Amino acid sequence: MPKPPTPAPDDATRPLSERVLSCVEQIPPGKVLAYSDVAEFVGTKAARNVGRIMAAEGGSVPWHRVVRADGSLAPHIRAEQLARLRAEGVAIRGERVDMSRARWDGR
DNA sequence: GGTATGACGTCGA
DNA sequence: CTCGACGCCATAC
């Protein structure tokens, strides 16, 4: 996945948290993004930090549409998240999301 | 200024 | 394919 030198980091002055939340809000139903994807979309490389932000303020956005790069889910939320994703018709394989099909390209 | 932390990622066993 | 160790990097203290 290419990374434009000047992607769409909105305002680099704005806290990463706001950019991350905005990005997650835009994920269409039935699709998902990896933490690392969100990170790039907002112009950072800290996938871990994305998760941290979600833990803090993710309650107001479709957090269930953000999964790990390999399609697995974070332990604490995996049950609820899995249920919601299924309900939206996201491609699931076993206990993981089928990234090759459900991954949002940012269209 | 440095240290600890985590809804992550990747590679090797 | 699964599991563990190590690396990353923005935040909070």
Image (cartoon, coloured by chain):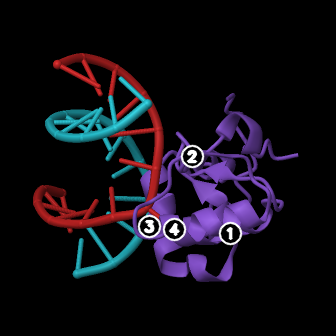
Chain colours: A purple, B red, C cyan
Lower position in the chain sequence, tag 3 or tag 2? 3
Q: Badges 2 and 4: C-beta atoms under 8 Å apart?
A: no
Q: Dot 1 lies on which element?
A: helix
Q: CA distance from mark 3 to mark 4?
A: 19 Å
Q: Nearer the viewer, residue A91 or B1?
A: A91
Q: Badges 3 and 2: C-beta atoms under 8 Å apart?
A: no
Tag 4: residue type?
Answer: Ala
Is residue A42 visible in the rendered image? The answer is: yes
On whether disc 3 and disc 4 are found on a single subunit, the reply is: yes
Q: CA distance from mark 4 to mark 1?
A: 9 Å
Q: Nearer the viewer, residue A62 or A38?
A: A62
Q: Which quadrant of the structure image shows residue A48?
A: bottom left
Q: Which residue is mark 1?
A: A84
Query: Could you tell me residue C8's position as x and y percent?
Result: 36, 40
Q: Badges 4 and 1: C-beta atoms under 8 Å apart?
A: no
Lower position in the chain sequence, tag 3 or tag 4? 3
| Front tag of 3 and 4 | 4
Q: Which residue is mark 4?
A: A79
Residue plotted at (76% across, 49% down): A8
On whether disc 2 and disc 1 are found on a single subunit, the reply is: yes
Task: Locate residue A63 relative to residue B7 in the image: left or right.
Answer: right
Lower position in the chain sequence, tag 2 or tag 1? 1
Q: Dot 3 lies on which element?
A: helix
Q: CA distance from mark 3 to mark 2?
A: 26 Å
Tag 2: residue type?
Answer: Gly
Q: CA distance from mark 2 to mark 4?
A: 12 Å
| Front tag of 3 and 2 | 2
Q: Which residue is mark 3?
A: A52
